[in-house]
Image (tube, helix red, strand yellow):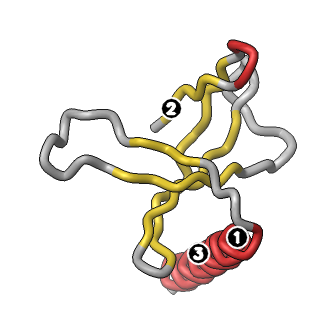
Amino acid sequence: MTVTLELDGGKSVTCAVVTIFTVESKDYIALMPLDENGENNDGNVWFYGYKEDLSDPDKEPVLSYIEDDAEFEKVEEAFDEYLDSCEFDELIDTDNAEE
């Protein structure tokens, strides 16, 4: 799944949605910016606050900048834990496939 972000200066960037996750009762989204070939060669991941309108599922979710450094660090740490769990899950799947 991808989303297109409109950046300052009128530039738009297509991003792959990595995951949506919760930190301290607030939702966040992790996005990987893609180049014109649909690839991410630098490994950058962007984090935004994420909010859906639960009363209207067809309405576009709202993304917001994370302006507080302490909040950003918590989000980054939670994402790192998510990645670690994915790698662990892949190891388990690989081990089970070998049996």
The amino acid on which the numbered mark 1 sits, given as a three-letter code, is Glu
Q: Which mark is residue 76?
A: 1
Task: Please give left or right for residue 94 compared with residue 41 in the image.
Answer: left
Q: Earlier in the sequence, mark 3 or mark 2?
A: 2
Q: Name the front one of labels 3 and 2.
A: 2
Q: Which mark is residue 14?
A: none
Nearest the eye: 96 or 89: 89
The amino acid on which the numbered mark 2 sits, given as a three-letter code, is Val
Task: Please give left or right for residue 93 compared with residue 52 in the image.
Answer: right
Q: Residues within 10 Å of mark 1 (few under 14, many from 20)?
A: some
Q: Decide: is 88 above or below 29.
A: below
- Residue 3 appears at what percent x and percent y? 50, 32
**Residue at image x 64%, y 80%?**
81
C-alpha span from label 3 to label 2: 21 Å
Give SS at disc 1.
helix
Nearest the eye: 61 or 86: 61
Give SS at disc 3.
helix
Q: Which residue is mark 3?
A: 82
Q: Residues within 10 Å of mark 2 (few under 14, many from 20)?
A: few
Give SS at disc 2.
strand
**Residue at image x 55%, y 26%?**
4
**Residue at image x 71%, y 16%?**
11
Q: Earlier in the sequence, mark 2 or mark 1?
A: 2
Q: Which residue is mark 2?
A: 3
Q: Residues within 10 Å of mark 3 (few under 14, many from 20)?
A: some
The amino acid on which the numbered mark 3 sits, given as a three-letter code, is Tyr
Q: Are marks 2 and 1 in contact (CB under 8 Å)?
A: no
- Residue 62 appears at what percent x and percent y? 42, 42
Q: Quadrant of the N terminus?
A: top left
Residue found farthest to the top = 10
Count of labels shown?
3
C-alpha span from label 2 to label 1: 20 Å
